[in-house]
Image: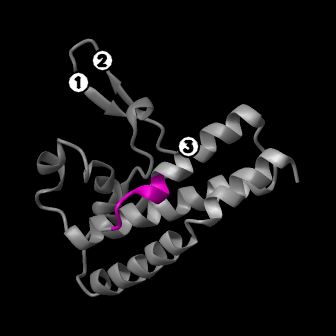
Amino acid sequence: MRNGTTAATGKIARFSNVVIEKISNTKSLARRTKNENLPFVLCHTDIHGDNIMKDSREKLYLVDWENVILAPKEADLFIFADADCSPMFCKEANADAVAYYKIRRDLEDIWEFLRGLLREEYDKEEQAEVYCHLTRILKQEIN
């Protein structure tokens, strides 16, 4: 293992209690939302600025539907939960389901970043960027 990888994973290890708490919160939220019979819809699962296009008439399009799934709408809406536009997108969303999908995404990102570090998939510059992303996710207040 390269020294940069060892140093980065060592710095991340101090957040293990945060990851354990996120896992616990995810399980609790999943149990609470399981029996609510939320309707399933087509969900994009990767909404971000690079997947939104605007035409000449200012109409917006969501592109890159390669990971589409059937899930409650909250599987996509969680991305707006902390944004200023949250009331516009999330006012009729199930708050527990939004929190579940947000924490679940955090855990997926943590896993992917750590997996890449441990497999030494990143060069030194990429390691620094990944470490910044991991630290941001791990320092977020747990809902």
Q: Residue at x 87, y 48 (%)?
A: 2
Q: Give amino acid for label 3.
A: Cys
> Is residue 92 highlighted in magenta?
no
Q: Position of residue 58 (x, y in %)?
A: 22, 18
Give the label on residue 55, or none. Answer: 2
Looking at the image, residue 127 lies above or below residue 36: above
- Ranked by sequence position, the earlier of labels 2 and 3 is 2
Query: Disc 1 vs disc 2: Cβ atoms closer than 8 Å?
Result: yes
Q: What are the residue bounds of the magenta stretch?
A: 137-142
For the C terminus, which image quadrant? bottom left
Residue that label 1 marks: 59
Separation of marks 1 and 2 at Cα, in angstroms: 5 Å
Q: Position of residue 13 (x, y in %)?
A: 64, 65
Pointer 3 local density, CA inside 10 Å: few below 14, some 14–19, many at least 20: few
Give the label on residue 132, or none. Answer: 3
Tell me: 70 left or right of 14.
Answer: left
Looking at the rendered structure, the secondary structure element under dot 3 is: helix
